[in-house]
Amino acid sequence: MASWIEALEQRFGRRPPPVSRVSTPPTLRPGTRVIVVGGGIAGSSFARQLLLLTNRENLPVRVYLINSTNCNYCGGLITDLALQTMQELLALDVPAHLVLKQVKSCIYVNQKGYVPVQLNQPLTATLRTSRFGVEGFDDSLKDRILEGLPGEYAEQLTSIEPTIVKQVLREGSGWRVVLSKRNPDKSFMEIEGDVLIMASGFRALNRPMMTGFQAAGGYVPPPTMEASVTEVDTSQAEFNYIGSRMFILDNLVPGAMLAFIPKGENWLTVTSLGHRMSKEDIDYLFTHPSLREFIYFPQASAHLRCHTICPASVYTGASPGFYGDGWAAVGDLTGYGRVLKDGYFASFLGTRLAAETIVYHGTSRSDFNRYYHAPLRFFAGDNRVGMTLFNWDNRLQQYPWFRHFLVKAARAEARRRPYGSSLHAAFRSLATGELSYRLTATLFVAGLLGHAALHPWDLAAGRGEDRVGAG
Ligand SMILES: Cc1cc2nc3c(=O)[nH]c(=O)nc-3n(C[C@H](O)[C@H](O)[C@H](O)COP(=O)(O)OP(=O)(O)OC[C@H]3O[C@@H](n4cnc5c(N)ncnc54)[C@H](O)[C@@H]3O)c2cc1C
């Protein structure tokens, strides 16, 4: 029989949005030219969804997808929600050869110890950009924009890469973009369009193209926080029992939520949110006492697969201005998705709404406000709870009594039932993203208070040790 916590997860777990059945006739003019700047997950997902909808309406359009082919951040963990949403909205699957690992369980770790946490749905580990001889998930999506569409659709999509959009200019009610690619006469190539979709991700921020676009269109970036990612070759580790488990590393580096994501027998992705990792951090993590039963790898930083730790950013809230007359931003640039988790899901959902708005409602600021922005607003309140949870955890993890108590309480749950209850569901949700942050925070509080009521003496354990970061 399912426990109450399984019933709760079943009842409140997020589901992929159903394919909408917009019943109004399309308003998009045949032959409309749509420029998409950026062919990452959001740009490709937008192009595919727009073409799926125009195919359904038998409405010819012209899509220009312009992408610079920089190596994108490693990472690439696809949650079950993102996978199902992709199947539902994009009619695409993750090809088997892209799957580097199916992550089936998780270990929560803090300075005081660890707790095994069962997952109720697998996570799919892929590489994002094609590298190391492995095809990347983001790249494979870009290659499959036209999959299943009639052959003549090839003419409706023009992919231009590798090239950098140097300038975005407003031309009357339309747009002109200037590329770094040159024409035979050596002038810079230019593309004109009626609608502009900005999908350039955070790497484009503060570049001249983006500052020009902000001035021309009124785009305002969302608030962001530091992050970083790297890939470690663990073949030289003294021992490695990571297996197919994902590790959530809570404040092993103060102020940061880190993760180990297995990509193969000798391959781990390390991500950090709230902190840019240094090589010293990597060496510290791979010899940390809380991880000693799983991996021991002194000088792991000498074995980074691309010899570097990529700096990155993640959004912590919503953009105050991500659409206007004739343009919209999609993907990370919107700040609308679940903070700290599941950028793929957010990109699939957001691009669907943007494409539907353009096909069925129009491309004015008020159309985007009503049909693109309004359905995404539910993220904002929950994200405030998510960021509060993140910040409070960072504060509390400085105190030995708290980290000790959290591990003890979670282990006590597992002794009663391996699947655990409140705290395990909260940890599980950090890995899978399946519950709202409101519910996750409630489960943390309930689990901690419940254990404190039954075992108040556990609160005293760990006192007397130094506070992390205390002088
Ligand atoms: C460290 C880290 C780990 C993450 N891990 C995960 C994860 O495991 N799972 C998950 O779901 N999400 C993860 N995310 C979030 C996820 O990566 C993003 O939400 C997602 O990539 C957003 O896609 P995007 O298309 O908006 O931007 P990007 O993926 O950044 O794509 C932007 C594209 O635009 C191109 N571009 C930029 N400027 C120009 C220009 N001037 N001209 C032409 N092209 C341009 C770039 O080359 C790129 O191809 C992670 C994020 C970080 C920072």
Image (cartoon, rainbow, N blue to C red):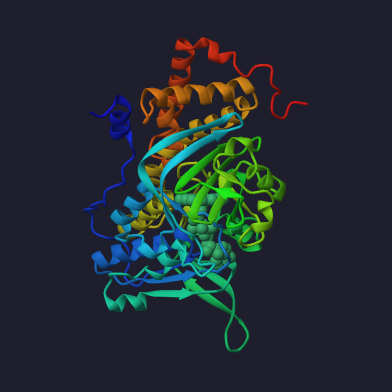
Q: Residue furthest front?
A: 238
Is residue 340 something that shows in the picture?
no
Q: Residue furthest bottom?
A: 185
Q: Residue at x 46, y 16 (%)?
A: 451
Q: Point out residue 96 in the picture as x, y percentages from the top left corner.
A: 36, 62
Q: Point out residue 328 in the picture as x, y percentages from the top left corner.
A: 46, 56
Viewport quadrant of the N terminus: top left
Q: Residue furthest right?
A: 471
459, above or below 363, in the image: above
Counting every numbered tag in the picture gives: 0
Camera-side residue of 35 and 106: 106
Q: Point out residue 239 in the picture as x, y percentages from the top left corner.
A: 57, 49
Q: Point out residue 258 in the picture as x, y percentages from the top left corner.
A: 57, 42
284, above or below 135, in the image: above
Camera-side residue of 16 and 30: 16
Q: Residue at x 31, y 29 (%)?
A: 8
405, above or below 341, in the image: above
Q: Residue at x 29, y 60 (%)?
A: 91
Q: Residue at x 46, y 27 (%)?
A: 441
Camera-side residue of 177 and 338: 338
Position of 121 compared to 20: left or right?
right
Is residue 420 something that shows in the picture?
yes
Q: Quadrant of residue 93?
A: bottom left
Viewport quadrant of the C terminus: top right
Camera-side residue of 444 and 295: 295
Position of 407 compared to 140: left or right?
right
Q: Quadrant of residue 388?
A: top right
